[in-house]
Image: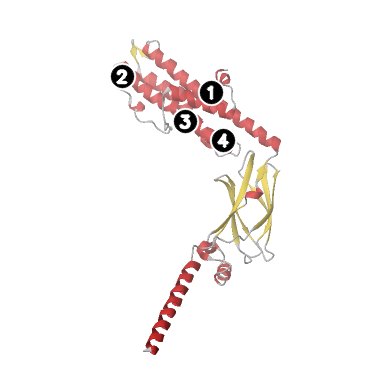
Amino acid sequence: MKTIMILRVFLVLLLALFQGEVLLAQDDSGPPKPAPTFIELITVQTSMKKDVWQMRVVGKAPTLPAKSVIGFEIRWRTTIVYSFNVEIDGTRRIDQVIELKGLKGCISNLQLRSEIRPQSQPREVQLAMESNPKMYPLETAPWKQSFWKNKFDLGSALEIDKARLEAQEFFLKKMKAGLKYQRTFEDARSASLDSTRFQQGGKFDPKSWQSFCAKDVRDPIRKLQMEMKEASRSLTILPHSRDMKYLGEIINAIAKRSYDRSRSLYGELGLSADSNDLSPVKIDINCRSTKLSSLQKTVERLCESQKIEMSKLSS
């Protein structure tokens, strides 16, 4: 009996020990460790050479296999400004000059972000990584780093301040143009109701009205929207992305009003709306509101943000 009791106690202790080992193993198997950081960035230098921005990146990646390819992105906040790759040699040092072709304007507070994708590496690099899973844990790939401490500018402080003034002039010019088309349209609409324009044989002439809407209002707005789309890609306008949304809201509301108010004009004249007022083509009319009060508030917000005096809109 004593022997049986001793065996039972031993089994109970052994089971408790086994369960303890299981619990310890579960504790060690928690969430995966953070992705490793392979790159030590030393400096980022920028300069202008023959009207092309150049950037020199200096650093090292001592623990990466030779011939590893590092993908870099130049970012302004979450916007990717430019992308390029760097292949490291046997020294594991990074010292490369990149021509940033196509980038125009000036901007401050850019940063680099790197990404290493094991599956995109040369075969010999992939094999080296697979042979050392502790140093290159594939479960955390792709390995990304953001270099917050190495922020840099394209342009001097004077050039960046000049770019800010250029952006201010851009917003003023586009707002004035849009509001001019709005006034031109409303004046013509009132003249239609007063029978002082767009008449033929004493009656309203839809063809001359539609010709006016196309050539004097909608075609210029289309051109304005294309210019805004192109400008939004420039370094000078990029920091003003919120204000570009304000400007888009203003111009799009004016475009939509030219359709809504034209359609209502036909109704006031006892006529059916022309098909051109029902199917806008190649013009952006997406906006939150076409009310004049909403339009006025958006203009005021944009002027306040850009420090533009409202009086300049009518000068």
Q: CA distance from mark 2 to mark 3?
A: 27 Å
Measured Cα–Cα span from mark 1 to mark 4: 18 Å
Q: Which residue is mark 2?
A: 267
Q: CA distance from mark 2 to mark 1?
A: 30 Å
Q: Earlier in the sequence, mark 2 or mark 4?
A: 4
Instruction: Say which amino acid is labelled 3.
Output: Glu
Q: In front here: 89 or 108?
A: 108
Crowd tier of the residue under label 3, counting other residues whose Cα lies within 10 Å: few below 14, some 14–19, many 20 or above: many
Residues at marks 2 and 4, CA–CA distance in whole angstroms = 41 Å
- x and y percentages locating residue 167 in the rendered image: 60, 32
Task: Report the residue at 67% width, 49% height from top.
Answer: 55
Q: Label 3, secondary structure: give it.
A: helix
Residue 139 visible at all = yes
Q: Which mark is residue 240?
A: 4
Q: Counting residues from the N terminus, which is met first, the one under dot 4 or under dot 3?
A: 4
Side (left or right) of 51 relative to 212: right
Residue 237 occupies which quadrant of the picture?
A: top right
